[in-house]
Image (tube, grey):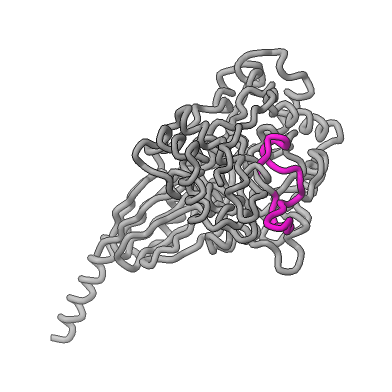
Amino acid sequence: MASKNIAAILSLVISTSVMAETVEVGQKDKKFTQDSLDIKVGDTVKFTNNDAFFHNVFSLSDAEMFDLGSYPKGESRDVTFTTPGEVEVECAIHPEMKMTINVQE
Amino acid sequence: MSIARIAKPTITTSVLVSAFMFGLTPAQADEHYVFEAGHTSLQEWLMPEVPYPDNNKPNAERVDLGKMLFFDPRLSGDGNMSCATCHSPLFGWSDGLPTAKGFKSKVLGRASPTVTNSAYNSLQMWDGRKKSLEDQALGPMLSSAEMNVDLSMAINFLKGNSTYVQAFEKAYPGQGIKDETLAMAIASFERTVISNNSPFDRWIKGDKTAMNKQQVNGFKLFVDPEKGNCAVCHSAPNFSDSGFHNIGLKSWGQENPDMGRYAIKPINLMKGAFKTPTLRDITLTAPYFHDGSAMTLSDVMDHYETGGSVQTNLSPNMKKLTLTQTEKADLVEFMKALTSPQKPFVLPILPENAF
């Protein structure tokens, strides 16, 4: 019985993990390539700088606070979102760059 | 389109992310200009129409009212300062001082930014704490360090002056004299302070004679990331990315330095960062930098050549430059081509005192 339960839990864990996604959002021409994005808890967003100069990515939203520092063209930084809610994402260097990530249960 | 969804087991994140990165082929963002007068590749440098908010479309009545208000010292605590005290047409809509002088001539910490082309700024003030010209207009009046006026008394003064009452009614019919209409009128006037007819503009439009060979070479150096590296921040069309950068001035290395944008956005990168100013009409607005530490454009070039005097928290877009004396001179000559022809400015006749 115990082994059956463990198998069921393992199965659940594996199926849940298979559903997790990585979504890429670019930074191009001083804009995020998405104005808004819907993801699920556990998903990861990869922020890739496609401009010829440095960008930053940060959020001061309650649902997910992070500061990815600055990085040049071709480099990426990942954030895994663990809390449901609306997350405002910005570039500190270029404040016109903004997007919203809706993290759903 | 650089958005992609990849279903993956979270346990193998690092492997898949690495594979994804190697497969990534971001489009080239480098711009390739053809340095010929009027060439299509350069047209992004032309100023667009002046933007304005939906609820404050400029018209003659609003601009005329705003012009009177902008120059009226009766809107200050001591009755001797107006917006034009620090933003004077005599000094390219700045004040010619290293840093501003406020109430009782107190020396303030930052230079007076020019009004010229501020209509195009997405954020106002050196630290970007104001979102629009309307939002900014009353800030200096309310500041005890600047114009230091009791705004309710200023509004009462305007309401008691028949000329202003009529002017407000023509400009904003039925809206009355209040904080909002006062700010909207001043912003409407500021949107008329525009520089878009410099030798550089005329050259971009196709006038081969508008810039000389030295200035064209200076423009090439200006946009070349391996030379001047200027356009990385002073970008088209207003020679500003509307962004915030710590450029490593000596004042940043002092005790308790001005934290700049960090006070508004507490992100480490913003410590000591200030908004990129426009370079249009730059010859009229010396001294330069937010702390007024560069007296000439050559001084500015000397600073950037070092890559920053103080390296702590330096903007990642800053780098040490390798320029010959000739190249530095060419860059300065190019910046001189960014000033529009100046016309005599007609001051307003202010409404009479009513005692």
Secondary structure that dominates the magenta span: loop
Residue A84 point in image, percent of width and height: 29, 65
Q: Left or right? Give the position of B94 relative to B306.
A: left
Magenta stretch bounds:
B87-111
Q: Is residue B147 magenta?
A: no
Name above or below for residue B203 compared with residue B58. Answer: above
Name above or below for residue B147 compared with residue B176. Answer: below
- Assign the N terminus of chain B to one quadrant of the image: top left
Residue at image position (62%, 58%) is B260
Toward the right, the furthest residue is: B325
Residue B82 point in image, percent of width and height: 63, 46
Q: Left or right? Give the position of A31 relative to B3.
A: right
Camera-nearest residue between A91 and B130: B130
Name above or below for residue A30 compared with residue B293. Answer: above
Residue A1 point in image, percent of width and height: 13, 86
Q: Is residue B26 visible?
A: no
Name above or below for residue B167 compared with residue B355. Answer: above
Residue at image position (81%, 40%) is B296
Residue A59 point in image, percent of width and height: 44, 60
Camera-nearest residue between A6 and B46: B46
Number of numbered labels in the structure image: 0
Q: Is residue B93 visible?
A: yes
Camera-nearest residue between B173 and B42: B173
